[in-house]
Image (cartoon, rainbow, N blue to C red):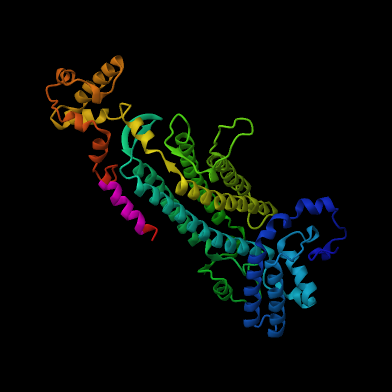
């Protein structure tokens, strides 16, 4: 088969070489974006009288026909036509005749593919933002239910201080809020049109790039033709933002996995988001959380792969840049699977408040309350810290907790202790008293929930 670009070639490549160089196996995902870009381009060519209006109308009608077939899954693509652009051009020529070959006037595959990816990411990032917001809504729903559920807070995976479980969950809300803001901010760089930049230097045809950009819904155009066809920063930014988002999901997944274990028993995942064992009948595995944690690595890999591909490329377009798509598609697919999975896990999980209460009453996470109590009565905090540490050691030796210490033992450690120390040591009291802005105090958690609800509408 003669290539659409094959005029100067005397030999044709063997099939295995064609297959190695072709991208149609994956860039067919851009079929609707490619058709959308072509429709805008030919409308502009007709309006600028680069093409006779009759030719532009015929091409547009042919593209509409192809669009309908694409939406119905009726288009067949060929490796011999390499990529989505040449495949669609060949299908257009088959549909309407040689006039279809005029579509490529005033553009190159270089600006065409860049336009496709800008359109693709603009749509996908908008959808990802919506998925993040749905996930945030699930977190708010659970957090609001458990503002006054007290759970051990951890540092170094050691019990540290009692906190509101709602407060803990809301930590991930704010992580996701930053992820959402980064995605929204990235749209400024995505929402720019490279169409009309040509292969690298623009075109001698009297085209109107602003018109085609407006037809495609872009807010601006690249001001430099070399930059327009060689820029992949917008994909790198998406992959970077996605890596941070997946890191947040992975951290949350790790906690879900811990909390659902027999050792914690803080939560139970719904059966929908769990699996069993083929040999151990008792098992209920948090496989969906584990998969999200595992898929984080592939998103990181996609970012580093593209960074590595681009780092040594001279301007403008190079065939290496064909490697920009699979990682982008894979990351989009991973995010659009992981976010709804996580939303469902959080929305449907059962919180075992009894296990949490037992845990928070069976540790020394209230030790800071005792030290703060002494400091509030005038003892230097370092001295209060030392007194408290010795009391903890005494408890460990005797096999009980600070709240169980006889008052005589407390009094012998410091004359500053009064009977109200026992109320202070209660986990719920400890949490309630943390009233500083952003703290775990119940009033503060309700305050941040109010802020959160405004952010997600």
Residue 455 to residue 91: above or below: above
- Residue lying farthest top? 397
Q: Name the quadrant containing residue 11.
A: bottom right
Image quarter where the N terminus lies is: bottom right
Magenta: main secondary structure equals helix
* 452 with respect to 90 (left or right): left
Determine if the magenta segment contains residue 247: no
The answer to whether any part of residue 229 appears in the image is: yes
Up-down relation of residue 374 to residue 442 (above or below): above
Residue 110 lies, in percent from the top left, at 66, 62
Q: Which residues are magenta?
A: 443-454
Q: How many marks?
A: 0
Q: Nearer the viewer, residue 351 or 402?
A: 351
In this view, the residue farthest toward the right is 10
Q: Quadrant of residue 46?
A: bottom right
The one nearer the camera, 173 or 425, is 425
Residue 206 appears in the figure: no
Identify which residue is drawn at 24% across, 43% down: 436
Across and down, in percent, residue 384 comes to 20, 25
User: At 80% across and 54% down in the image, what residue appears?
Assistant: 18
Considering only vertical position in the picture, is 135 above or below 436?
below
**Residue nearer the viewer, 15 or 341:** 341
Where does the image place residue 457, in percent across and percent down from the top left? 38, 61
> Could you say where residue 435 lies in the image, as x and y percent from the top left?
23, 43
Figure quadrant of residue 56: bottom right
Residue under the image location 28 percent in, 51 percent down: 447
Q: Residue at x 59, y 61 (%)?
A: 120
């Amino acid at each position: 088969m003669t290539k659409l670009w094959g005029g100067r070639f005397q030999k044709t490549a063997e099939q295995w070489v064609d297959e190695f160089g072709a991208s149609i196996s994956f860039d067919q995902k851009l079929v609707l974006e490619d058709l959308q870009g072509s429709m805008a381009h030919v409308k502009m060519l007709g309006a600028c009288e680069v093409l006779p209006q009759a030719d532009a109308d015929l091409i547009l009608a042919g593209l509409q026909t192809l669009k309908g077939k694409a939406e119905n899954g009726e288009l067949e693509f060929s490796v011999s036509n390499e990529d989505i652009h040449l495949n669609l051009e060949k299908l257009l020529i088959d549909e309407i005749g040689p006039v279809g070959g005029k579509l490529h006037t005033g553009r190159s595959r270089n600006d065409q593919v860049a336009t496709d990816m800008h359109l693709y990411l603009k749509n996908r990032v908008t959808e990802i933002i919506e998925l993040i917001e749905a996930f945030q809504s699930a977190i708010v729903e659970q957090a609001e239910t458990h503002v006054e559920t007290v759970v051990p807070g951890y540092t170094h995976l050691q019990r540290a201080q009692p906190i509101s479980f709602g407060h803990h969950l809301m930590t991930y809300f704010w992580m996701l809020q930053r992820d959402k803001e980064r995605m929204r901010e990235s749209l400024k760089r995505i929402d720019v049109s490279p169409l009309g930049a040509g292969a690298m230097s623009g075109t001698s045809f009297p085209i109107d790039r602003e018109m085609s950009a407006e037809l495609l819904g872009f807010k601006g155009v690249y001001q430099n033709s070399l930059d327009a066809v060689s820029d992949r920063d917008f994909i790198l930014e998406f992959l970077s933002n996605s890596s941070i988002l997946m890191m947040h999901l992975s951290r949350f997944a790790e906690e879900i996995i811990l909390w659902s274990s027999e050792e914690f028993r803080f939560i139970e995942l719904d059966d929908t988001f769990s699996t069993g064992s083929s040999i151990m009948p008792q098992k209920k595995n948090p496989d969906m959380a584990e998969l999200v944690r595992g898929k984080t690595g592939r998103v990181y890999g996609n970012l580093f792969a593209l960074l590595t591909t681009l780092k040594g490329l001279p301007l403008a377009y190079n065939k290496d840049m064909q490697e920009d798509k699979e990682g982008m598609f894979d990351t989009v697919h991973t995010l659009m699977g992981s976010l709804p999975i996580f939303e469902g896990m959080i929305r449907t999980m059962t919180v075992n408040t009894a296990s949490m209460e037992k845990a928070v009453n069976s540790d020394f996470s209230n030790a800071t309350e005792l030290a703060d109590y002494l400091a509030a009565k005038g003892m230097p905090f370092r001295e209060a810290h030392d007194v408290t540490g010795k009391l903890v050691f005494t408890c460990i030796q005797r096999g009980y907790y600070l709240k169980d210490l006889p008052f005589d033992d407390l009094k012998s450690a410091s004359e500053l202790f009064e009977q109200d120390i026992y109320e202070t040591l209660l986990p719920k009291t400890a949490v309630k008293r943390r009233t500083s802005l952003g703290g775990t105090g119940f009033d503060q958690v309700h305050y941040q929930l109010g802020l959160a609800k405004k952010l997600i509408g």
